[in-house]
Image (cartoon, grey):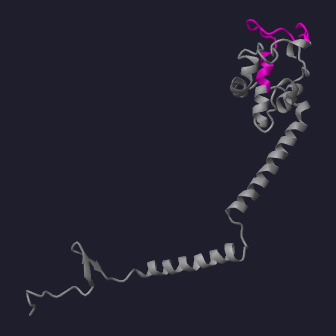
């Protein structure tokens, strides 16, 4: 018979407690124990493979290799695009022209105005083109810029698709008549040299 002053203890309960909560000493499930052992084995293999014997690339090395592969793909695509410039035609696709209009507004309008009438940069609506009037010439100017006149090169900033889109959009500005356009460059009065000295 059990003594009511000393009830029998559950054999799985340990003697210590915290705030009345006792620890239950039961066995862990076998699958959990084996999974734990596997993580130990995996960590040992991982440590040896990557850090001791240097057989695999760590994150930074893998990142640099991926960057080199990515740059090679990008440069090949850019070179292919630039090699085909003279054979490209302006697009009349509405979606491409809309994208070109967005690119133009973001990057070109500050110098050429929203309507292409010219501001710091030349008027894009008349038929006088300083660096060539073909569509291919426009693509080359966008890609390489005109550093001596302050126009940035957009190579590496804009994708080939964006360059084609914005060049196609600019092509649609030709022959339009914006209000107060900048005078054609060949008809503009010469600027006295001493003005900038």
The x, y position of residue 117, in whole percent, is 77, 12
Our reading of the magenta stretch's main secondary structure is loop
Name the residue furthest bottom.
Answer: 1
Any magenta on residue 45?
A: no
* Above-or-below relation of 43 to 74: below
Q: Residue at x 81, y 36 (%)?
A: 155
Tally the numbered discs. Answer: 0
Give x and y (percent) for residue 3: 9, 90
Q: Residue at x 43, y 82 (%)?
A: 30
**Is residue 91 among what the camera can see?**
no
The image quadrant of residue 184 is: top right
Is there any visible trace of residue 87 in the rendered image?
Answer: yes
- At 73% from the left and 16% from the top, the residue drawn is 113
Q: Is residue 122 above or below residue 168?
A: above
Task: State the quadrant of the N terminus.
Answer: bottom left
The vertical placement of 54 against 166, above or below, is: below
Q: Quadrant of residue 152?
A: top right
Quadrant assignment for the C terminus: top right
Q: Residue furthest front?
A: 197
Residue 188 lies in magenta, yes or no? yes
User: In this picture, which residue range is highlighted in magenta?
Assistant: 167-192
Q: From the viewer's perspective, tell me whether residue 76 is left or right of residue 23.
A: right
| The one of 81 and 94 positioned closer to us in this rendering | 81
Residue at 82% across / 43% down in the picture? 77
On the image, the x and y values in percent for residue 128 come to 89, 13
Q: Quadrant of residue 15?
A: bottom left
């Amino acid at each position: 018979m059990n003594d009511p002053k000393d009830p029998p203890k559950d054999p799985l309960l340990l003697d210590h407690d915290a705030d009345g909560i006792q620890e239950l000493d039961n066995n862990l499930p076998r699958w959990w124990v084996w999974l734990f052992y596997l993580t130990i084995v995996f960590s040992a293999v991982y440590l040896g493979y990557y850090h001791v014997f240097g057989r695999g690339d760590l994150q930074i090395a893998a990142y640099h290799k991926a960057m080199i592969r990515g740059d090679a793909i990008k440069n090949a695509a850019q070179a292919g695009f630039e090699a085909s410039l003279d054979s490209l035609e302006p697009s009349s696709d509405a979606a491409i022209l809309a994208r070109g209009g967005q690119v133009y507004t973001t990057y070109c309008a500050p110098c050429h105005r929203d309507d292409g009438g010219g501001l710091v940069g030349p008027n894009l609506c008349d038929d006088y083109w300083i660096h060539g009037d073909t569509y291919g010439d426009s693509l080359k100017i966008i890609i390489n810029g005109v550093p001596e006149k302050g126009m940035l090169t957009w190579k590496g900033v804009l994708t080939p698709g964006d360059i084609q889109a914005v060049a196609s959009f600019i092509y649609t500005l030709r022959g339009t008549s914006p209000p107060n356009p900048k005078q054609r460059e060949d008809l503009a009065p010469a600027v006295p040299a001493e003005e900038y000295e």
